[in-house]
Image: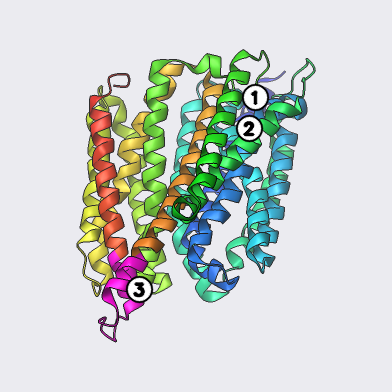
């Protein structure tokens, strides 16, 4: 080979590696974009199909069950199909879910379509992170990892403002229609850039339906318990207790089966490292807090304070932009910080301060008054989850990274769904209490409904502040991650 030919091949290889980085970022970004837009636009979407605000928890349940099912099947399916075909299947399900959601006219249709979306989306976050050490050379992996993180936070920053503009200009179905061409571009990218053989096993895969059904029923019962806890706790406590007990029992049986199985869905035996388990607990706290807050803010700002949807969207995206700038700063300077626990504690206290600040706002506060607490909120994810992530995977090591990330993503979706359900149900309950307390005494300008929701939002922000302080204490006292 001539020198010119070698240079040309190296140039082509570098170009393909950079395209792969963009593809990895786009795949993980599309799920975060979709989740962010849906959560932000939940109120107009549910109103359009004549569903109640608390039905948001049911829709989230559908997404969560589909997502977790795809995550637990990931190891088997990639070994059988390879990552290319697995991701193409996921994109097909995700795209069909988008179309189904855009055309939905009832709550059952929306739940079923969101379940399809969840099955597709469940593949993206896990697969792209696991593929980084597989597709990229040692020299290129740091850049690929940075691209991955920037894509996640960029999608979170763009989603609220994009959803607000789509709902305002063309209506809520465009929250889903806009993703269809993105999916088609990603299909072309996966088909072109992901090697056919990556992830595919030479040895035959032993399929077993029993553990899949066991997990599906267990996860379904637990998710149903999250959703129905408020409605059945007083009216039918025995039904709720049976559902919770059944879900916990089946999850326990699933865990025992996986521990003993030589070819499990989740490799639990390899994930008993104390540092990894401590990191998983911090992840759980983070996902609960951020998901609760993500649901609460648009409800509080739009329905409580009466801010226009466009204003609320841009305010939410402002917080996301602060987080993105924080990510870039973290990637540049974090290596100089040896003990990252103080940073994580500070991140939790930032979230507590932001939530407390939101709880003190007046109902007629101008949008500019929200910028400071939202900017402080934007630092939470950067200072809390990024250090926790690096320390968690360092504790687990490269050998079991893919297995640990799979289990972490199951936990992630469980906590996202739990937090969304708790936020939706709690907001409605406290709103009704405040509405009853206000009676007809609300002034005509704001209205009793908006006053009640505003007061409920203030109380829930105090909850967020308390949980964030609790998380700071947990971070400070734990000794496994430093």
Give the class, few, some or many, for how many residues have Cα within 10 Å of label 1's Cα (few <14, many ≥20): many
Figure quadrant of the C terminus: top left
Residue 265 numbered mark, or none: 1
Q: Please tell me which of labels 3 and 1 falls first in the chain.
A: 1
Count of numbered labels shown in the rendering: 3
The residue nearer to you, when weighing 284 against 178, is 284
The residue nearer to you, when weighing 382 against 395, is 395
Q: Residue at label 2?
A: 215
Q: Is residue 17 left or right of residue 238?
A: right
Figure quadrant of the N terminus: top right
Residue 452 numbered mark, or none: none
Give the class, few, some or many, for how many residues have Cα within 10 Å of label 3's Cα (few <14, many ≥20): some
Q: Residue at label 3?
A: 307
> How far from the left and from the top, in percent, is residue 66?
64, 44
Q: Secondary structure at mark 1?
A: loop
The residue nearer to you, when weighing 19 against 286, is 286
Please determine whether, in this image, residue 380 is positioned above or below residue 474. Answer: below
Residue 454 belongs to magenta span: yes
Alpha carbons under labels 2 and 3: distance apart: 43 Å
Q: Please tell me which of labels 2 and 3 falls first in the chain.
A: 2
Question: Does the image show residue 367?
Answer: yes
Q: Secondary structure at mark 3?
A: loop
Alpha carbons under labels 1 and 2: distance apart: 10 Å
Please determine whether, in this image, residue 186 is positioned above or below residue 203. Answer: below
Give the class, few, some or many, for how many residues have Cα within 10 Å of label 2's Cα (few <14, many ≥20): many
Query: What span is colored magenta in the figure?
Result: 431-455
Q: In this rendering, which labeled residue sits more in front, label 3 or label 1?
A: 1
Please determine whether, in this image, residue 203 is positioned above or below residue 278. Answer: above
Tell whether label 2 touches label 1 (CB within 8 Å): yes
Give me the residue at 40% from left, 34% from top: 283
Alpha carbons under labels 3 and 1: distance apart: 46 Å
């Amino acid at each position: 080979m001539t020198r010119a030919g070698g240079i040309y091949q190296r140039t082509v290889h570098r170009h393909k590696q950079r395209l792969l980085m963009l593809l990895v970022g786009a795949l993980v970004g599309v799920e975060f974009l979709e989740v962010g837009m849906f959560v932000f636009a939940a109120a107009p979407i549910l109103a359009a199909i004549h569903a109640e605000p608390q039905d948001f928890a049911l829709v989230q349940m559908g997404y969560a069950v589909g997502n977790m099912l795809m995550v637990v099947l990931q190891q088997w399916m990639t070994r059988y199909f390879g990552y290319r075909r697995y991701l193409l299947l996921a994109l097909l399900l995700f795209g069909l879910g988008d179309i189904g959601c855009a055309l939905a006219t009832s709550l059952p249709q929306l739940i079923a379509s969101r379940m399809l979306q969840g099955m597709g989306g469940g593949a993206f976050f896990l697969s792209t992170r696991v593929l980084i050490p597989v597709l990229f050379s040692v020299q290129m992996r740091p850049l690929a990892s940075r691209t991955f993180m920037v894509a996640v936070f960029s999608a979170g920053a763009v989603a609220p403002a994009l959803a607000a503009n789509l709902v305002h200009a063309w209506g809520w179905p465009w929250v889903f229609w806009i993703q269809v061409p993105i999916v088609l571009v990603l299909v072309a990218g996966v088909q072109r850039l992901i090697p056919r053989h990556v992830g595919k096993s030479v040895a035959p895969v032993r399929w077993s339906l029993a553990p899949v059904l066991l997990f599906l029923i267990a996860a379904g019962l637990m998710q149903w318990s999250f959703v129905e806890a408020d409605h059945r706790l007083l009216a039918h406590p025995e039904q709720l207790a049976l559902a919770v007990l059944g879900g916990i029992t089946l999850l326990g049986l699933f865990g025992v089966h996986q521990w003993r199985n030589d070819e499990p869905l989740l490799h639990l035996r390899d994930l008993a490292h104390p540092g990894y388990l401590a990191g998983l607990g911090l992840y759980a706290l983070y996902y609960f807090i951020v998901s609760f807050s993500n649901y609460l803010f648009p409800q509080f700002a739009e329905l409580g304070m009466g801010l226009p949807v466009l204003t609320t969207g841009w305010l939410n995206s402002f917080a996301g932009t602060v987080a993105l700038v924080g990510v870039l700063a973290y990637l540049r300077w974090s290596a100089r910080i040896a003990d990252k626990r103080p940073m994580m504690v500070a991140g939790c206290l930032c979230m507590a301060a932001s939530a407390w600040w939101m709880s003190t706002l007046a109902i007629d506060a101008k949008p500019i008054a929200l910028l400071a607490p939202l900017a402080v909120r934007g630092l939470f994810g950067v200072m809390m989850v990024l250090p926790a992530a690096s320390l968690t995977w360092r504790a687990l090591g490269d050998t079991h990274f893919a297995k640990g990330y799979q289990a972490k993503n199951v936990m992630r979706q469980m906590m996202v769904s739990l937090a969304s359900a708790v936020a939706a149900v709690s907001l409605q309950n406290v709103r009704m209490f405040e509405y009853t307390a206000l009676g007809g005494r609300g002034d005509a300008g704001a209205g009793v409904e908006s006053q009640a929701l505003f007061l409920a939002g203030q109380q829930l922000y105090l909850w967020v502040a308390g949980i964030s302080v609790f998380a700071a204490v947990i971070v400070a006292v734990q000794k496994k991650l430093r």
